[in-house]
């Protein structure tokens, strides 16, 4: 469930810096003249003055490739879990898309364990 809150624009960098202390924070950044969502190390890296990003914020949630398990010596091991994440600055339509993804990957009939684990540890701001 999403709760709507207002953030004072003048304090966004400060808010992001505070969030970075306890979370992996993904925000819109400029990379090679393209806005994309990536992990930031300081609040000042976030770009808030863009109309549309070239790459969707869900790419931070669903990277093009990731390690699902490591198979070695006849045994499969899951990689260490990532920490709690904050996805900051997604447009309302992109943020709402996570509710649609929930209906696909987290239902009473089917639960994708990888999706559910990430989703439970991700906060949209």
Image (tube, grey):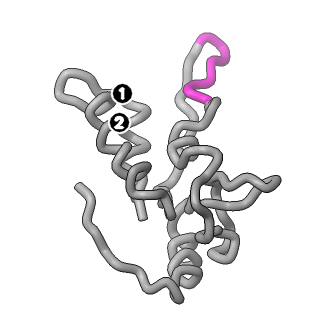
Identify the image quadrant of the C terminus: bottom left
- Which residue is at the front of the view, 114 or 12? 12
Looking at the image, tell me whether mark 1 or mark 2 is earlier in sequence order. 2
Identify the residue at image location x=37%, y=43%.
97
Say above or below: 80 vs 5: above
- For disc 1, the marked residue is 112
Q: For label 1, count other residues whose C-alpha is less than 10 Å away and answer few (under 14), some (14-19) or many (20+).
A: few
- Which residue is at the front of the view, 79 or 124? 124
Identify the residue at image location x=56%, y=73%.
21
Q: Position of residue 78 (x, y in %)?
A: 53, 30
Identify the image quadrant of the N terminus: bottom left
- For disc 2, the marked residue is 101
Give, as a single range, the part of the protein colored magenta: 67-74
Q: Position of residue 91 (x, y in %)?
A: 45, 57
Say above or below: 10 vs 119: below
Q: For label 2, count other residues whose C-alpha is less than 10 Å away and answer few (under 14), some (14-19) or many (20+).
A: few
């Amino acid at each position: 469930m999403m709760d709507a809150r207002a953030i004072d624009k003048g304090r966004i960098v400060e808010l992001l810096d505070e969030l970075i202390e306890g979370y992996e924070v993904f925000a819109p950044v400029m990379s090679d003249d393209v806005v994309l969502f990536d992990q930031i190390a300081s609040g000042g890296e976030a770009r808030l003055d863009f109309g549309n990003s070239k790459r969707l914020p869900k790419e931070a949630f669903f990277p093009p490739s990731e390690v699902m398990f490591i198979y070695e010596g006849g045994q499969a091991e899951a990689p260490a879990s990532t920490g709690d994440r904050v996805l900051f600055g997604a447009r309302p339509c992109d943020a709402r898309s996570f509710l649609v993804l929930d209906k696909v990957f987290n239902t009473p009939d089917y639960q994708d364990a990888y999706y559910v684990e990430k989703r439970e540890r991700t906060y949209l701001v």
